[in-house]
Amino acid sequence: MTLYALNLFDLADNDLYREYLHRSPAAVSKHDGWVVALGRLGEALDAGGPEVEPRRVMILVEWPSQEAFDDFLEDPENADLHSLRRDGTRNYLWWTYERLDDLRPVFADLPE
């Protein structure tokens, strides 16, 4: 089942994320992932309250399966790559979402 990884973050005051950007496209494509969208914060329409600050950067990556994403995470060639991502950013949020054709499965999880 298709999996999406949503990355929301601010850049740190260093060049580590630039290094990450040089290597990450090949590492992602090696495991059949691809960047669906890149974005810079425009306007925070509903930030969810004063305790949630919007992040400046958004990246959405599509993976063919959870297994492909796990292989990317566990690939020994990427061991130092992940630290570049972590140390090159601040306020990092990273969530995965399963692809749905409609919202019925979400409503099925709600109590009646």
Image (cartoon, helix red, strand yellow):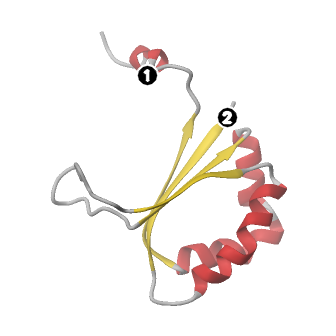
Percent position of residue 30, x then y: 84, 57
Residue type highlighted by circle 1? Val
**Residue 11: where, in percent of width, then height?**
46, 77
Q: Find the distance from the CA under tag 1 to the CA under tag 2.
A: 16 Å
Q: Give the residue type that dot 2 points to.
A: Thr
Judge whether 24 appears above or below 16 on screen.
above
Viewer-proximal residue, 41 or 15?
41
Q: Pick the quarter of the image with the N terminus.
A: top right
SS at mark 1?
helix
Front-most of residues 104 and 70: 104
Q: Dividing the picture into quarters, in which one does residue 87 lie?
A: bottom right
Q: Residue at x 75, y 74 (%)?
A: 23
Q: Residue furthest left?
A: 50
Q: Residue at x 25, y 59 (%)?
A: 52
Left or right of 77? Residue 10 is: left
**Residue 72 at what x, y percent from top left?**
75, 57
The residue identified by callout 2 is 2
Residue 41 x, y percent position in the rendering: 37, 62
So how many labels did they put on this image? 2
**Tag 1 residue:** 106
Q: Residues within 10 Å of mark 1 (few under 14, many from 20)?
A: few
Q: Nearer the viewer, mark 1 or mark 2?
A: 2
93 left or right of 29 in image: left
- Examine the image and state in which quarter residue 78 appears: bottom right
Mark 2 packing: few (<14 Cα in 10 Å), some, or many (20+)?
some
Q: Is 92 placed left or right of 44 in the picture?
A: right
Q: Is residue 22 above or below residue 48?
A: below
**Which comes sooner in the sequence, label 1 or label 2?**
2
Q: Residue furthest front?
A: 42
Q: Quadrant of the C terminus?
A: top left
State left or right for residue 63 relative to residue 111: right
